[in-house]
Amino acid sequence: MNYLKKTLFLFALLAMMSTMRLSIGLVEAQDSSTVNPHYAALLNNSMWFYEAQRSGKLPSNNRVPWRHTSVEDEQDQNHDLSGGYYDAGDYMKFTLPLAHSLTLISWGGMEWYDGYTRANQSGYLQSTIRWGTDWLLKAHPDANTLYVQVGSGKIDNNYWGPDTGIPTPRPSYAITNTATGTDVAAMTAAALASASSFFRQMGNDTTYATTLLNAAQSVFALAETQPFQTYTKAVPEADNLYQTNKYSSQLVYGALWLYKASGNSDYRGKASHYYDQFNLGETRSVIPMDWADCSGAVSILVYHAATRWLDTMIDPSSSSASSSPCMFTKGGMLWCDGYSDSNSMVPLQDTALLALLYSRLHPPKSKQYTEFATKQIEYMLGNNYMMTPYVCGVHMNSPHNPHHAGASGGTDIGKIDTSPPEELYILYGAVVGGPNKEDLFYDERSDWKQTEVALDYNAPFQGLVAYQISTNAADPPYVTITSPRPSVYRSFVFPGWLLAAIIVVVVFILAGIGYCLWLKRHGLKQRWGGPKAYQV
Ligand SMILES: *[C@@H]1O[C@H](CO)[C@@H](O)[C@H](O)[C@H]1NC(C)=O
Ligand SMILES: *[C@@H]1O[C@H](CO)[C@@H](O)[C@H](O)[C@H]1NC(C)=O
Ligand SMILES: *[C@@H]1O[C@H](CO)[C@@H](O)[C@H](O)[C@H]1NC(C)=O
C-alpha cells in the first residue's frame, strides 16, 4: 500500500479530530468566563488591522476612521474587481498572498475558535474571512479565468499618500486556461476550500460554504490545466513582487483542503498523486513556509513528514537527515537565511503556528513543540533585546513607523521618513517585518524589510494569539516592560566599491613609491657605476 495513502488517512483523522475538538472547545468556552485581556486586545487589534486594509466600498460599521471607500468601481473589461484587501503598505491587490493568508486564518480559526469566542472576536473573524473570499469569488468569474493582480507596481509604488488619491490606471492581470498559473490557482483553491470548511463548521452558513466549495473545485480544475507553470510565466508583471519558483506544494495543499472541505476521496487521491509525482516527501532540505511555499504546511497535513520538517526547522543542529537554512539568533529568534532577511517575523510565526497545529497530533514531542512556539511568541511580544513587541499600537515600545502609506499621513515619497516625523495614524495590530539577524530594530519607515506590514504577516499571528487565549497563557511579555526601547544606531557598513577604490589607490601609491625607489637605485647605479664600466 502506498505509504502516503496511509498517511492521508491520518489527514481524515485530523479533520475528524478538529471537529471533535470544536465541540470540546465550545464547552470550554462556555465554562470559561475569563479571557486574558492583553491577548484579547491583541486579537481585536489584529482584526482591526485587516479592516484597515479593506479596498472598495467600506461598510457603515467600518472602525478605521482614516480609511475611505476607494477604487469602488474597479473594473476590468466590465468585470467587477472591487473589494478585497490591499496587500501591504501600498494599494496593490494580489491573489497569491491573500489566498495564503486566508487559508492560515481559516485553519487557525477552526483550530482555536474558542480563543476567538472568548475574546468576542468570532464575528470579526467571519467578516474578515468573508471580505477576502468574496473578492476571490469575483476574481474567478468563469472556469477559465483567475485574476491575480490589480494595480501596476510601477505606478503604485511611486505613490505615497492617503487612500483618497490612489493613482490610476489600475490594470488587472489574469491567468487563464491558456496562460496557466498552477501555483496561484491551487493556492486559491486552498483558500476557498479552507474557508468553506470554516463557514460550514463555525459560521453555520452552509449556503456560503457550498458556494465557496464550488468555486474551489472550479479553480482547482484550472490549476490542473496543462502546462503546469508558475504564474509569473503568464503574468510577468508580478515578477519580483510575488514570484514563486515552484507549484508542487500548492497543488498538494489545494487538493488536501478540497478533500477536507468536500470529503471527496478523489481529492485525497490527487493529493497523494502530486505528493508522489513531485517527490515532496523526499526533500533533502526543509523549506520554511511562507506565501511562496507551503510544503511545511503540507507535511503537517499529511502527518508523516511533519516530525522531520519540524525537528529540522526548530533544531537545525540536531538533524543529520535534512538541512535547514535556519538557526537561532543570539536573542533566541528563529532566523532562516534567505527567508527572514526581508521579514523576520514571518518564518518565526509560520513555524510556530505549524508547531502548535502539529503538537497535539504527536504527543511524544508535543511539549517540545509548544515550548518552541511559546518562546517564539514571547520573543515577538517583547522578550527580545529591543524590549519591543513587533505589533503596532499595543505598547509604548511598539513600532511607531510602519511602512504604510495610508497610516503615515505623508504624501511625499521623497521624504518618507521625515514627513511627518511620526506616523499620523496608529496602525493598531499590524505585525511589522521585524528585527535583523543581530536582533536589532531601527523603526524607520523607509526600511521596508523591518517596518512593512502585510496581510500574510498577520495571518499566522491570528492563530498564535487565539491559541494563547484558548490555553489561558500568562500575560504577553510587553505588559511588564516599563523602560523605553534601547537606542540603536546603524553601524557604518563599509561599501564594497569604496574598499575596492581604496585598495586600487593604495596599490598605485605603493607601486609609485616602489618605482621611484627602483629608479633612484637603478638610476644611481647607472650614473655612478656606468662610467666605471666604460672605464674597463
Ligand atoms: C479594538 O481595537 C480598536 C483599535 O485599537 C479599538 O478602537 C477598539 O476599542 C478595540 N475594541 C475592543 C473591544 O477592544
Ligand atoms: C462583541 O463584538 C461585536 C462585534 O462582533 C460587538 O458588536 C459587541 O459590542 C462586542 N461585545 C463586547 C462585550 O465587546
Ligand atoms: C446558526 O443557525 C441557526 C439556525 O439557522 C441560527 O439560529 C443561529 O443564529 C446561527 N448561528 C450563527 C453563528 O450564525
Image: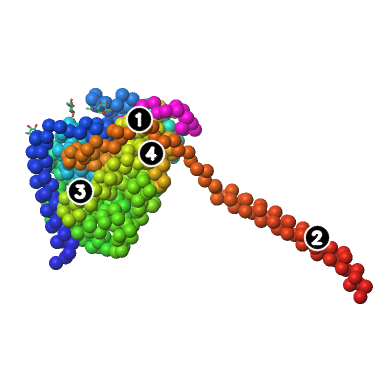
* Labels 3 and 4: the sequence-earlier one: 3
Q: Which segment is the magenta one?
A: 412-428
Residue mark closest to the camera, 2 vs 3: 2
Is disc 2's CB within 8 Å of ligand 1?
no
Q: Which numbered tag is attached to residue 357?
A: 3
Question: Does the CB distance between marks 2 and 3 fall below 8 Å?
Answer: no
Residue mark closest to the camera, 3 vs 1: 1
Residue at coordinates 70% horizontally, 58% vertically from top-left? 511
* Labels 1 and 4: the sequence-earlier one: 4
Question: Does the CB distance between marks 1 and 4 fall below 8 Å?
Answer: no
- Residue bearing mark 1: 396
Q: Position of residue 508 (x, y in %)?
A: 69, 55
Is disc 4's CB within 8 Å of ligand 1?
no
Rendering quarter of residue 22: top left
Q: Which three-letter amino acid code belongs to the residue tagged 3?
A: Leu
* Labels 2 and 1: the sequence-earlier one: 1
Look at the magenta stretch and give its main secondary structure.
loop
- Distance between mark 2 and mark 4 Cα atoms: 60 Å
